[in-house]
Image (cartoon, rainbow, N blue to C red):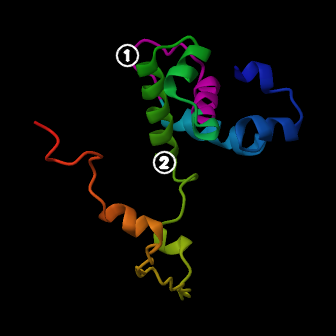
């Protein structure tokens, strides 16, 4: 799925496909254009908007890089490098960074404890015919009969 195929979709469909709103996608694309420069190397096979879409597909759908790479007719290594490059550029921009662990955790933690009694209990063994049956010798013939 290329950006050209989904850019004219309704806002709700775009959100369902990519996991972000169109405005967020455009902001990410603008941040990437400022961060990623191609100097002195071969230009990538995919446009920057398609690279961002590939990364969003990886994040959203939890597909393997092999499957995503086959969708875009790339190698698995190229898809991995693309995801890493896009992630690093978005992090460097500072606009799409999640707050730290302490900011996500509330200041006063309330603990709830559930106690489960998992001690072992003896099970009574049946005392009827089974107990007498086990007391009998296992062989059916007396030992004096065998040579």
Mark toward the start of the polypeptide (1 vs 2): 1
The range drawn in magenta is 37-57
Quadrant including the C terminus: top left
- Tell me what residue is drawn at x 57 percent, y 17 percent: 46
- Tell me what residue is drawn at x 56 percent, y 14 percent: 70
Percent coordinates x, y for residue 132 in the rendering? 38, 67
Residue 75 on the magenta segment: no
Residue 51 on the magenta segment: yes
Q: Secondary structure at mark 2?
A: helix
Q: Which mark is residue 40?
A: 1
Q: Mark 2 packing: few (<14 Cα in 10 Å), some, or many (20+)? A: some
Q: Does 131 sit above or below residue 114?
A: above
Disc nearest the viewer among 1 and 2: 2
Q: Which mark is residue 91?
A: 2
- Tell me what residue is drawn at x 56 percent, y 11 percent: 73
Quadrant including the N terminus: top right
């Amino acid at each position: 799925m290329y950006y050209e195929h989904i850019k004219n979709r309704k806002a709700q469909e775009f959100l369902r496909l990519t996991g972000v709103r169109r405005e967020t996608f455009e902001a990410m694309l603008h941040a990437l254009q400022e961060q990623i420069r191609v100097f002195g190397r071969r230009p990538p096979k995919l446009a920057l908007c398609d690279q961002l879409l590939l990364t969003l597909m990886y994040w959203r759908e939890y597909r393997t890089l092999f499957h995503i790479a086959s969708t875009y007719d790339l190698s698995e290594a190229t898809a991995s490098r693309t995801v890493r490059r896009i992630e690093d550029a978005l992090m460097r921009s500072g606009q799409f960074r999640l707050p730290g662990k302490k900011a996500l955790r509330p200041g006063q933690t309330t603990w709830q404890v559930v106690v489960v009694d998992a001690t072992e209990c003896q099970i009574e063994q049946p005392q009827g015919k089974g107990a007498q049956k086990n007391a009998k010798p296992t062989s059916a013939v007396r030992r004096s009969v065998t040579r």
